[in-house]
Image: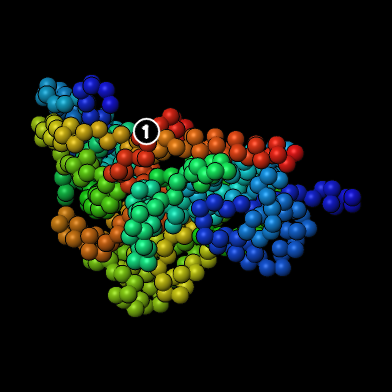
Amino acid sequence: MSEAAATKGKLAIYWAASCGGCEISLLGIDTKILDVAEAFDVVFCPCIADGKVRDVEKMQDGEIDVCLFNGGIRTSEQEYMARLMRKKSKVLIAFGSCASEGCIPGLGNLHNRETIFEDSYQETASTDNPQRVRPQSVTEVDEGKLHLPVFYDTLKTLDQTVPVDYYLPGCPPESPRIWEAIEAIVAGKLPPPGAVIGEHTTVCDTCPRTRDEKKIKAFKRTWEVLPDEETCLLEQGLVCCGPATRAGCGALCPAVNSPCIGCYGPNQGVEDYGARLMSALASVIDSEDPEEIDQIIEQGIPDPVGTFYRFSLAASHLRRSKREVAAGNGPSAAAADVR
Amino acid sequence: MSEQKFEPKIVGFLCNWCSYRAADLAGSARIQHAPNVRIIRVMCSGRVDPSFVLKALAMGADGVMIAGCHPGECHYLEQNYKAMRRFGMLQHTLRGLGVEEKRVQLVWASAAEGQRLAEAIDQLVADVRELGPLHWAGNWEENGERLQALEDIVHEHQEAMEVTA
């Protein structure tokens, strides 16, 4: 074995409740992927290479140097894999918005297992299911028991499930940022554990538009106006998430006349993304009359949770909406286990 | 739930210049009001970030009161208008998350209005008492299958390992 091979690190890339965009973005580092291959053996990445969970189970604890974990935790299988990857990895990185803050799958937290199943297996127009068949976690057949993962009522972020060392924000993380993170890992120049590997400022700071005084009488939806290309979009009444969102994307959306939707997650020091955005948007409303204020808000922002928590509902203080339907088997011992 | 009588836990964010002094006045004037509010003094109602309210609810509060100077009388000129707008945003969002409107109330009380503040506290406590406990963390509980399923996976994988080993 050559010296280089002996010092090669081991890299794992795993996915849970996510779309696969994070892997695409990782491959977006282009030919630099060869540099990654030089520094690391990719020991486990079901998305792009064959690999078996059993092989990971056979590894020593901490044998994997770095695990990039994308996706939220929606099922028991994903929770098991999160625990397994945590155990086998020295450094576990919540890679991308889903693992860090729940992202779009986290908006499922406005519903619960019952209502999601009802929608998916009953209500959709193309579904014909007169016997109301639903996925069962255990099915008895002649050969024995068959298992399907248990679907949770609430999607959890990775750090609500296992301890996480670093976070890489973005839906998905931009390829240049991924490369910077990999360089930092290889050079051993990582920030203190628990940190977000990213910028410490907002999208507004990197947005080239001119900002003046923000005073608006109405919020507008994107289809209602053709915005002027020079002025701050928020000043033009569009709900732009720039003031609350971490920089790192290069303000791609405002550059093409489209408001920021907040995919890079909360800026440094922000505990609750939606709260920060509510504060920012509230301060631009030009009214001192409670009734008019309510009218501006209700007409301009028809979907407040989807607007303020599009990417971060699962990581917000409240994590989900009030659950109207009781959980499958009632409250359990698992409650004490929830961080 | 136990059979004990429900005593609402309310967190109150009171501004230093008006409402906190109204609370002081209510105390020194021996005005009776419900003892359920845990008061946190802030310099201005405009200091109350919506995240304070959300955190209080997530951590077990059944209701939250935000109290400040009357509109037009803010010690910092117009920050209570900011509080008013944020409150509108917050209520709009809380409705979307299924939190009853009466659990979070915005109150104006000047330093001379100990009576008014005491009445507002009594009203909020009565409203929350009627709504019942919020117990927000209970919304995060998974159904009882979760732990069993995790155990099953571990067990299944161990069995599989034994077969191949």
Q: Is residue B5 visible?
A: yes
Query: What chain letter is assigned to the residue under label 1?
Result: A
Q: Residue at x 75, y 58 (%)?
A: A37
Name the one closer to the observer, A145 or A208.
A145
Residue A303 drawn at (x, y percent): 30, 59
Residue A246 horizontal side relative to residue B95, left or right: right
For disc 1, the marked residue is A331
Residue A47 drawn at (x, y percent): 62, 59
Q: Residue at x 39, y 58 (%)?
A: A120
Q: Is residue B89 above or below residue A24?
A: above
Residue A305 drawn at (x, y percent): 33, 54
Q: Residue at x 51, y 53 (%)?
A: A17
Residue A6 drawn at (x, y percent): 84, 48
Secondary structure at numbered mark 1: loop
Name which quarter of the figure residue B125 lies in: top left
Q: Residue at x 27, y 36 (%)?
A: B134
Q: Is residue A167 visible?
A: no
Residue A55 horizontal side relative to residue A301, left or right: right
